[in-house]
Image (tube, helix red, strand yellow):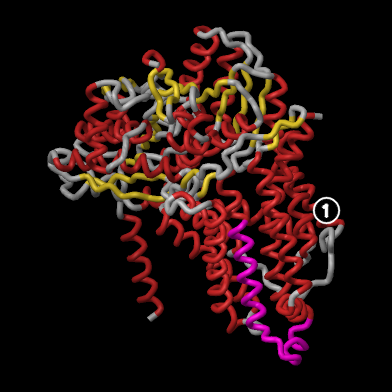
Amino acid sequence: MHFTRFSIAAAALIALAACAPPGQQAESGATATGPIKIANVNAQSGQLSSLGQWEHKGVKLAIEEANKAGGVNGRQIQLDLFDSQGDPTVGTNVARKISAEGYIAMLGTAESAVTLAMAPILKDAKIPNITSGQSPKLAELKSPFLFLNAPTSVTFDETLAKYLVDDKGMKKIALISNNGAYGAGEHDAFLNSLKTRNITPSADEIVTPDQKDFNSNLAKIREQDPEVLFIGAEEVQSGLIAKQARELGIKAVFAGGAPVGTDVYATTAGLDNAEGTIVSSPYLSNEATPEIKEFAAKYKAAYNEEARMHVAKAYDGASILIEALKQTNAEGGQKLADAIRGVKRAGLLGTYNYDANGVGIHETKIGLVKDGKVVPEAAS
Amino acid sequence: MQVFLQTLIGGVTFGAVYALVAMGFSIVYRTMGLVNFAHGSVVMIGAYAASTFYMASKLPFAVAVVVAIAVTALIGLVIERFLRPLENKDFTLMLIGTIGFGAVLEAGAVLVWGATGHAVPSPVATGPIDVAGIRIPTYSLLVIAVAAAATGLLALFLQRTKRGAAMQAAAMDHQAATAVGIHVGRSNAMAFAIGAGLAALAGSLIGPMLYVNPTMGGTLGIKGFAAAMLGGFGSMPGAIVGGLAFGLLDSFAAGNFQEYSELVTFLVFALIVMIRPTGIFGEATVNRA
């Protein structure tokens, strides 16, 4: 009796071991016919969920279009959404889940910290990941399976420093940034760009990502009376900093990366306080080119809201993945990663041309906040 | 000196809100010996309710706050009603119950208002007051004044009214209180309602200073809880002093220790609690565990 039970258990174990990880052999390849499983991982709850929801809508739009047009060589794409809550621990759990459940690629997340935490697991599972994170640490990983659909903070902040210092001659610059993965990346990248121009910031305040009261940090900055206040934080915190800075009487112009170009920043700061903020971003307006205009109209029709950078970059990332899937005939793993690296695409954020570190776009533009919206600097 | 005074103003403003949150924790603990872990989530619901009535229904801010207090007081009554059968029976289950209610309230907020949150415009149109280079935001003054008024009213209620005295009596010895005809269940319900009302007041006041979203109760709950511990759990003056002390500690640590500010805040907190486990106003409070 015991022997029978043992043999059943052993047979079950052997059968389990014989199964290949789903998505690598069983579900992919030229002979497979079922849907192609793609995971979209983004924060759907928590303080960063606005980003996650924009990202998801952008990805969904691209996938739905591809499916309507016949899918990938006749096969439909199945897009499943996972909530990372903007939390690296939740992210690693999701990474294990998607590698166990046969997903052949992942789109997202919008947060560098979560992407950094997930990257090693996805690399081991050979699942290509196209992320919206932009911390320079993502590129430093040099993972062959990690791709960025926007530039890193190095590019964002070099453009910003060039505009502020080289073009506008501003030299009294103060920094305030948080020590989260995104904020720390922004801080280091902007500081480096200033250093190469022989400029020492008049103040360099570091806050924590949860901090709400910046009176002490900003009072120190006010004593230096800077011309520019660089803000290296996410949307909501950047808005709170800008609001409290103006309340304290700081007159410096605010400058930063993509977060200060969002309406979340502008409404949190108050439209008057956000006015004139200098933004470095690869995507400034829904009117910039005929392609972007067309995309923005499509998005408005689908979701009844204005498109924005996070939507556009997620759409770009998903489009690159679809193009690569067509080339590999929906095969995943190393072949898909190589195909993504090879895609040259004129996207909404610029021309994608992936380097060895997985960075696809290498330049940003300067915009200014007017009435809560970003307008290209040249047009202002 | 300017930096010092400016830091002080930030610290006192946030401290006043922490004090309100701490008072909510304390009044429930004082009456029932129970830490209400749903309290942070009630703060969040209060912030959402007040900002929704203020922005969408265009009610004056003060009216929106009163409506928010009424809404959360009702939630407080519901929580107490659910927990009442467990009173004096299973204390641990009651604690877990409050954690569960917190999760339910957060999920409910996502369902009703969505996950993204919204910014709340300041209800005070006037700019900051400049006193010798120190900028005092008008809204900060309002927050401090309202918190002080609420504290005064609560003290009057507890000390000068029959119902307040009955609540104090039930807190001290619920069996004796029952013997003299005080309805302990009703007294507990009132404590929960007042606690939730205080949470709503804190949430409504902090809304225009922050960004209202379903997870905002987490940090505020933890800081309010720490403030209550620091002051002496269950003590009303303790909650006020603890709240202000925690706000100031937070504010000065942010300026002086930068990215280590949170670490320093909680290290100092841990040290104080180690030296004085009952908090600054340590008094023997109820323990029905």
Q: Quadrant of residue A70?
A: top left
Q: Residue furthest right?
A: B275
The residue positioned 27% from the left and 31% from the top of the image is A320
The residue positioned 78% from the left and 53% from the top of the image is B270
Residue A114, how many percent across, how many down? 48, 41
Residue A324, how many percent across, how many down? 25, 32
Whether residue A349 is visible: yes
Depth check, front residue: B48 or B249: B48
The residue positioned 68% from the left and 72% from the top of the image is B34
As drawn, A352 above or below B83: above
- Describe residue B70's horizontal placement relative to residue B188 as left or right: left
The N terminus of chain A lies in quadrant: bottom left
The residue labelled by disc 1 is: B272
- Describe residue B189's horizontal placement relative to residue B232 as left or right: left
- Describe residue A228's horizontal placement relative to residue B266 as left or right: left
The C terminus of chain A lies in quadrant: top left
Whether residue B288 is visible: no
Q: Main secondary structure of the magenta part?
A: helix
As drawn, A73 above or below B93: above
As drawn, A334 above or below B216: above
Q: Which residues are magenta?
A: B173-201
Q: Would residue A52 be counted in the magenta stretch?
A: no
Of all chains, the one bearing label 1 is: B
Amino acid under disc 1: Ile
Callout 1: few (<14), some (14-19), or many (20+) C-alpha neighbours within 10 Å? some
The residue positioned 55% from the left and 66% from the top of the image is B70
Q: Quadrant of residue A18?
A: bottom left
Residue B202, how many percent across, how many down? 62, 55
Q: Secondary structure at mark 1?
A: helix
